[in-house]
């Protein structure tokens, strides 16, 4: 059958969709070139904010109306449970994020409607990859137990579990053997890898080294794989920014000097209410540690504006923290109450217009800050992994430096373009808030 998977939400979902595609291909199905051609369409949904869920459910409704075999997978399914069929009466199947390994069987069985919310993450679903790319996502940690007050992720993705290191290392080896040059390790809080359960055998015992050991040791094991040029990981928590982690950065040049370190707020009062387990000062100490090690270390973040009770003063604290941290990029989210979370019990009392205003202020700040940070790099030579022709301008190539910054450069007509996945040395000539322009060095 010809199929297509539409993905909403985070990189975790991008990875899950890829696994579903790989499993369907292995089961004899074929990826469709367009939606019109597809006989089976699956939507991978997000539910982190209400808007995100509405988008995915809305899209699925349109597909159901088109009369194709339609499935919904991912976080919104787990949140909605059986209600998913009330919202989408013509939906054929719905599969929660930990049950995606069942999709090929569900399609083969052909008994609809069908709902699977399963708790066991299947290792086949974790390890299946689509071949051919130079970059790959690898899930190392599933679920989350942090229970930040606003967040629905623990409800829909289940308990935190670290995959056994030998499984991860074998998977990355196999990816590299098939041409992958860069891996990005995924988890809600990757630096917690091996903290809750032992990373070496996947058993339930916590690993003795805690934060200090398991993740840096995994990095060490991956850095030993020949042919793997770059290792990235996301997302991170400041508690995991240990001396051991910095040592891993220093020791292994393959580990990219970029960290996505969601801060959420710069106000201690709000951070405590959110249950983030760090203060503003502790967060900034983690930033200082990374930037002392390398002043060009790239930091990106997530921020929520309009959290219940967020005052103008709290908001200004977030603004000043963002400047102090000098974020290279940031993702701003307007607070959205999610059913069943702690903060949803409180009034959503920042008016939408004020959330919009705070959002715009932070975006404008980031535009200025991004330009300032990037301007410091003009004249430097950077190692850039070529990804492909730039989407905006076909005469240009696009790639990323170790800090995950987008770099574009001109390949003169007649010259052989670089191969995707090769690393080129470029001198930065021009800085923009979100991109750098370069020439071959
Ligand atoms: N596990 C990651 C975050 C996963 S959710 C971490 O803790 O680092 C991705 C982002 O969505 C969060 O960082 C947060 O900024 C945003 N988010 C989560 N719940 C939200 C909500 N209820 N309203 C608005 N934004 C939210
Ligand atoms: Fe949500 Fe917090 Fe877990 Fe991140 S760490 S997924 S924000 S509960």
Image (spheres, rainbow, N blue to C red):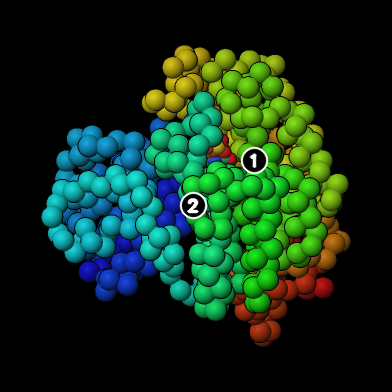
Q: Is mark 1 within 8 Å of ligand 1?
A: yes
Left or right of 42? Residue 393 is right
Left or right of 324? Residue 53 is left
Q: Is mark 2 within 8 Å of ligand 2?
A: no
Q: Residue at x 68, y 71 (%)?
A: 224
- Which type of secondary structure does the marked residue at label 2 adopt? loop
Q: Residue at x 30, y 47 (%)?
A: 118
Residue 203 bears which disc, if any? 2
> Which quadrant is the C terminus positioned in?
bottom right
Please state the horizontal and vertical placement of residue 265, each as a whole percent of the image: 65, 28
The residue singled out by tag 1 in the image is 237
The answer to whether 35 is drawn above or below residue 152 in the figure is below
Please state the horizontal and vertical placement of residue 368, each as a whole percent of the image: 74, 40
Q: Is residue 326 visible?
A: no
Please state the horizontal and vertical placement of residue 217, each as a whole percent of the image: 67, 58
Farthest residue toward the left?
111
> Which quadrant is the N terminus positioned in?
bottom left
Choose between 113 and 154: the one closer to the eye.
154
Left or right of 269? Residue 153 is left
The number of discs equals 2
Choose between 237 and 76: the one closer to the eye.
237
Q: Residue at x 33, y 40 (%)?
A: 78
Q: Residues within 10 Å of mark 2 (few under 14, many from 20)?
A: some
Q: Is residue 340 visible?
A: yes
Residue 226 bears which disc, if any? none
């Amino acid at each position: 059958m010809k199929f297509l998977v539409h993905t909403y939400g985070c990189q975790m979902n991008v990875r899950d969709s890829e696994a579903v595609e790989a499993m369907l291909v292995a089961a004899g199905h074929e990826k469709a070139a367009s939606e019109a051609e597809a006989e089976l369409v699956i939507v991978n949904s997000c539910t982190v904010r209400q808007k995100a869920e509405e988008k995915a459910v809305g899209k699925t409704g349109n597909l159901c109306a088109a009369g194709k075999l339609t499935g919904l997978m991912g976080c919104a399914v787990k949140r909605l449970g059986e209600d998913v069929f009330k919202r989408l009466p013509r939906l054929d199947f719905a599969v929660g994020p930990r049950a995606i390994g069942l999709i090929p069987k569900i399609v083969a069985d052909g008994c609809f409607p069908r709902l699977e919310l399963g708790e066991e993450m299947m290792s086949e679903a974790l390890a299946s990859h689509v071949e051919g790319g130079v970059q790959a996502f690898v899930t190392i940690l599933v679920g989350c137990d942090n229970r930040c007050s606003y967040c629905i992720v623990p409800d829909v993705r289940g308990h935190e579990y670290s995959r056994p290191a030998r499984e991860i290392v074998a998977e990355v080896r196999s990816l590299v053997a098939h041409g992958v040059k860069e891996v990005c390790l995924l988890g809600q809080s990757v630096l917690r890898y091996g903290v809750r359960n032992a990373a070496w055998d996947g058993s339930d015992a916590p690993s003795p080294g805690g934060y200090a050991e398991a993740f840096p040791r995994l990095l060490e094991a991956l850095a030993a794989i020949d042919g793997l040029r770059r290792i990235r990981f996301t997302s991170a928590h400041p508690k995991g920014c240990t001396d051991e982690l910095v040592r891993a950065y220093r020791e292994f040049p393959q580990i990219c000097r970029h960290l996505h370190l969601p801060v959420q707020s710069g106000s201690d009062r709000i951070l405590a209410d959110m249950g983030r387990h760090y203060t503003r000062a502790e967060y900034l100490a983690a930033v200082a540690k990374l930037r002392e090690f390398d002043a060009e270390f790239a930091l990106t973040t997530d921020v929520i504006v309009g959290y219940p009770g967020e005052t103008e003063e709290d908001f200004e604290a977030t603004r000043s923290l963002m400047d102090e941290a000098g974020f290279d990029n940031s993702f701003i989210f307007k607070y959205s109450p999610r059913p069943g979370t702690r903060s949803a019990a409180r009034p959503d009392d920042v008016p939408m217009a004020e959330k919009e205003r705070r959002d715009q202020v932070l975006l404008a700040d980031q535009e200025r800050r991004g330009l300032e940070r990037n301007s410091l790099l003009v004249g430097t030579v950077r190692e850039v992994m070529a990804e492909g022709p730039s989407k905006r301008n076909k005469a240009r190539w696009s790639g990323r430096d170790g800090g995950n910054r987008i770099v574009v450069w001109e390949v003169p007509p007649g010259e052989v373009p670089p191969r995707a996945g090769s690393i080129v040395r470029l001198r930065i000539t021009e800085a923009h808030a979100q991109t750098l322009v370069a020439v071959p060095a």
